[in-house]
Image (cartoon, rainbow, N blue to C red):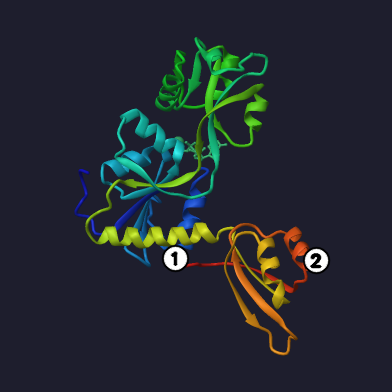
Amino acid sequence: MSAATDRERLRIAVQKSGRLAEFSQDLLARCGLGFRRSRDKLFCFGESLAVDLLLVRDDDIPCLIEQGVCDIGIVGRNVLAEYSAARQDGGIVELRALDSAHCRLSIAVPQELSCATVQELNGLRIATSYPALLGAWLAEQGVAAPIVELSGSVEIAPRLGTADAICDLVSSGATLAANQLRETFKVLDSEAVVAGAQSPPADARGELLHLLLGRIDGVVRVRESKLVMLHIDRFGVDRINALLPNPQLPTVTPVEGGNGRVALQAVCDGPVTWQHLEDLRRAGASQLLVLPVEKLLA
Ligand code: ATP
Ligand code: ZN
């Protein structure tokens, strides 16, 4: 790590605008962080903790961490992996996966092109904004294919005749379909991650980082979690536990004047659907209540 080691406040790089911008700000707000924006809107001063934000292009985030301008950043795994593949080092690492902004980096070919095996990629010109990741993947597969590096609009390269195939991010596949392309091989699974240096700062910032990562874990864990409360005959508890989606430490308490019925409550990791509730009722549960979980500190 080079510059800015004399900073006392933790600094987080987040995307200024784009798919991860609102998500990142929302995640940090859920972690209890509040910010005051500077006039140029590039810097946000943390008011609740000594944690500030730098609003940047997502591609710049790994480099800002490497240079010590920021301590951590919220970025797609695809961007971090491309940075690491290009430098062939593991200086900046994934500290947490955030289970959001899921997508994959995939190879796609024109619909009419046959491409059943990886070997059929041999000799095809592949357009991508991820040359290092693609290069490493091709080498691993033993495929020799020229890489055409493009900074954007990769999906139109085959139609323009500048490439035969592409390697780009896919989520729903709608963009590929609109460009008459077919997804063939997956290079990388991606989601939003917290990126940071391998070893945390050895000062107060390190403690802040530890605290913040703990809060992030709590937020990520409870995003889909629900507190389920219900009444059941006291002999039916095992039957109910088997029907709940990932129940964590179910608590059972007697119901006053309940004739052997008990109240069961459990935090369930994962969505609790109407179908779950109907199954629970059929299994003898009553007074079913599902509540969102706001915070969890295990
Ligand atoms: P910037 O202006 O900051 O450089 P960008 O245009 O490179 O932004 P976005 O399109 O906002 O980036 O995407 C940010 C991240 O969102 C991607 O790097 C990826 O991790 C994730 N993502 C999720 N789904 C998709 C998708 N369908 N296409 C592209 N990115 C996606
Ligand atoms: Zn970008």
* Alpha carbons under labels 2 and 1: distance apart: 40 Å
Residue ranking furthest to the bottom: 257
Residue 184, given in percent of the width and then of the height, sits at 60, 24
Q: Which residue is painted at 44% across and 27% down in the image?
A: 130
| Residue count near mark 2 (Cα–Cα under 10 Å), binned few <14, some 14–19, many ≥20 | few
Q: Assign a secondary structure to mark 1.
A: loop
Residue 120 coordinates in the image, percent (x, y) = 56, 13
User: Does residue 221 appear to the left or right of 91 in the view shown?
Assistant: right
Judge: label 1 CB < 8 Å from ligand 1. Answer: no
Q: Is residue 166 above or below residue 283?
A: above
First of labels 2, 1 by sequence position: 1
Q: Residue furthest right?
A: 282
Q: Residue beneath label 2, please? A: 282
- Residue at image coords 20%, 45%: 3
Residue at 36%, 33% (x, y): give it: 83
Q: Which corner quadrant of the image does residue 165 belong to?
A: top right
Quick check: 76 above or below 108?
below
- Percent from the top left, x then y, of residue 97? 46, 48
Return the residue found at the far top: 123
Say which quadrant the N terminus sits in: top left
Q: Is residue 212 left or right of residue 228?
A: left
What percent of the width, then of the height, locates residue 246? 60, 59
| Residue under numbered circle 1 | 32
Res. 190 visible in picture: yes
Q: Residues within 10 Å of mark 1 (few under 14, many from 20)?
A: few
Question: Label 1 sits on what residue type?
Answer: Gly
Q: Secondary structure at mark 2?
A: helix
Residue 115, compared with residue 243, is above or below; it is above
Ligand 2 in which quarter: top left
Dots 2, 1 in contact, CB < 8 A: no
| Amino acid type at image mark 2 | Arg
